[in-house]
Image (spheres, rainbow, N blue to C red):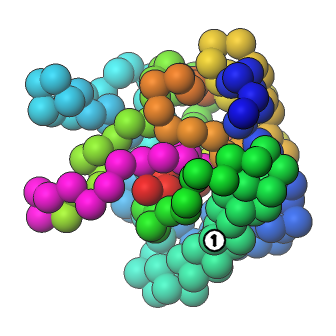
Amino acid sequence: MKTNLKNYIKIFNKKFFTKPQCRLIINALNPSTRTTHTFYNSGENKTEKMGHDPYISLLFDQQVIPIGNLIKHQWHKIISAYIVDWLDKKEKIDWFTGWTSYSFPKFMGYNKGTVMKNHCDHIFSLFEDNGKPRGIPILSIITALNDDYSGGEIIMCEKYKYKLKTGETLIFPSNFLYPHEIKKITKGTRHSMVSWVY
C-alpha cells in the first residue's frame, strides 16, 4: 500500500461525460430551485452559511429521470474503475471489498466571488434514512460540467491543485485525511456535480 495521500486522488478523463452531455445537464437545471449551499455543523447539529458559498440547483422535474439515469450510469462506471480496476488490480488493495451505493448528484454553481472553504466530506447527515444511519461516505466524486471560467481550482490536502476540464471527474477518499477547498471564482460561473459513495 502506498502512503502518499496523492496516490488515492484520481482524475478520470472526459470519455465518461462528453461536452454535449455536460451542456445538457447544465440546461436541465431549474434556476428557480437555487438555494445557497450550507455546511452541516455536527457539533451543534445545525446548518450554517459560511460567507461566499456557492448555490445548489435541482433538475427540472421532467429531467430527473433521464438526466439522473445518465449521470448514475456514468458514475457507476467511474466508481467501478476506481475501486475494481485501479485500487484492487493496480494498487493491490484487495481488502477493500466494495461499496453499497451513492447519493443522487448535488449540482453546484459558483458565481464570481464564491468559494468553498476547506473541509472534509464526512457528511453523515446525507446517509441517514428516517434518522437511521445507512452507511458513511467513503469516496467523494466531483465532475466538472464546464471549464470556461477563471479561478475555482480544487486544492486537495492543502497542497495539490487541480483544475478540471469539462467532463473530467475527480475521486478521492471522503475522510479527514482529504480536506479540500474550491478557490475563489474570478470570472464566469463554475458548474459541477458532486456525490458521495458509501
Q: Is residue 75 above or below residue 107?
A: below
Tell me if 160 is positioned left or right of 31 in this view. right
Amino acid tagged 1: His
Q: Residue at x 58, y 51 (%)?
A: 95
- How many numbered markers are drawn? 1
User: Which one is nearer the viewer's eye here, 72 or 63?
Assistant: 72
Can the viewer see residue 106 in this picture? Answer: no
* Residue 161, image x, y percentages: 77, 22
Tell me if 141 is positioned left or right of 17 in this view. left
Look at the image and say whether residue 142 sits in the magenta stretch: no
User: Which one is nearer the viewer's eye here, 45 or 183?
Assistant: 45
Look at the image and say whether residue 139 sits in the magenta stretch: yes
Give the magenta part as a residue range.
Answer: 130-141
Q: In this view, does 59 lie above or below 166?
A: below
Q: In this view, does 75 lie above or below 90?
A: below
User: Which one is nearer the viewer's eye here, 123 or 138?
Assistant: 138
Quarter of the figure with the N terminus? top right
Tell me if 186 is positioned left or right of 130 in this view. right
* Residue 30, image x, y percentages: 47, 66
Q: Residue at x 47, y 32 (%)?
A: 175
Q: Is mark 1 on a helix, strand or loop?
A: helix
The residue carrying pointer 1 sits among few (fewer than 14), some (14 to 19) or many (20 or more) residues within 10 Å by Cα, namely: few
* Residue 177, image x, y percentages: 53, 23
Q: Residue at x 46, y 25 (%)?
A: 176
Can the viewer see residue 117 in this picture? Answer: yes
Quarter of the figure with the C terminus? bottom left
Q: Residue at x 41, y 81 (%)?
A: 61
* Residue 165, image x, y percentages: 84, 46
Residue matched to label 1? 76
Q: Quadrant location of residue 80?
A: bottom right
